[in-house]
Image: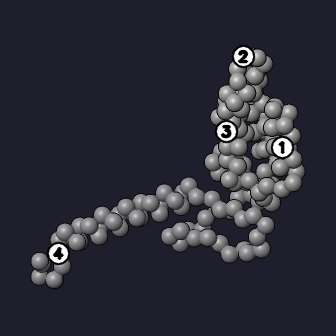
Amino acid sequence: MYPDGSDMHVRVEKSICNWILGFTFLELRNKTNEQRINSKITTNVNINKAVVERVEQLTCLGSAVTADGGALQYVKARIKRANGIFVELHTLWKNKNTLMKTKILTFNIHVNSVLLYGCGTWEVDTQITHKLHMFVNRCL
């Protein structure tokens, strides 16, 4: 215990926490972007009194998301990549000695994982759903 009634251990711990938090906020301020999807709110987002940059297109989990919420171009690119993987599996797919269960499992592991990567950031509408269904039906 020190004359001012504080404990040195607590002081050091608080200063370390303040340094870490300050560093974290500095990093966030330099790396953070804001995107609003179909929003009418115009107030700025601030981190440590610095305004966060607002962008029209943002990449999240490798998925490009636009301000209107559309992800159609990204879905088309995912379909092309998944088709490339499916083409590589052509010999397995046409092999009569391979069980259908094995083919479906291989399709789900290799093609669906590429096709649906980043789908949590998509604003799915009927057009996107239709494109995904058409691709899967064409493959299977």
Place residue 39 in its image quadrant: bottom right
Coloring scheme used? one colour
| Residue 42 in view | yes
Residue 133 is tagged as 1
Residue 7 is tagged as 4
Query: Which image quarter holds the C terminus?
Result: top right
Under circle 1, the secondary element is helix
Upstream in sequence: badge 4 or badge 1: 4
- Give the residue type that dot 3 points to: Ser
- Indicate which label's residue lies in the foreground, 4 or 1: 1
Q: Which residue is mark 2?
A: 97
Label 1 near label 4: C-beta < 8 Å?
A: no
Total marks placed: 4
Residue 113 is tagged as 3
Task: Give whichever of 136, 39 is nearer the camera.
Answer: 136
In three-dimensional space, the C-alpha distance between marks 4 and 3, rounded to whole angstroms, equals 54 Å
Task: Give whichever of 113, 76 is nearer the camera.
Answer: 113
Under circle 3, the secondary element is helix
In three-dimensional space, the C-alpha distance between marks 2 and 4, rounded to whole angstroms, equals 75 Å
- Indicate which label's residue lies in the foreground, 4 or 3: 3
- Indicate which label's residue lies in the foreground, 2 or 1: 2
Q: Is residue 129 left or right of residue 54?
A: right
Above or below, comparing residue 139 to residue 126 in the picture: above
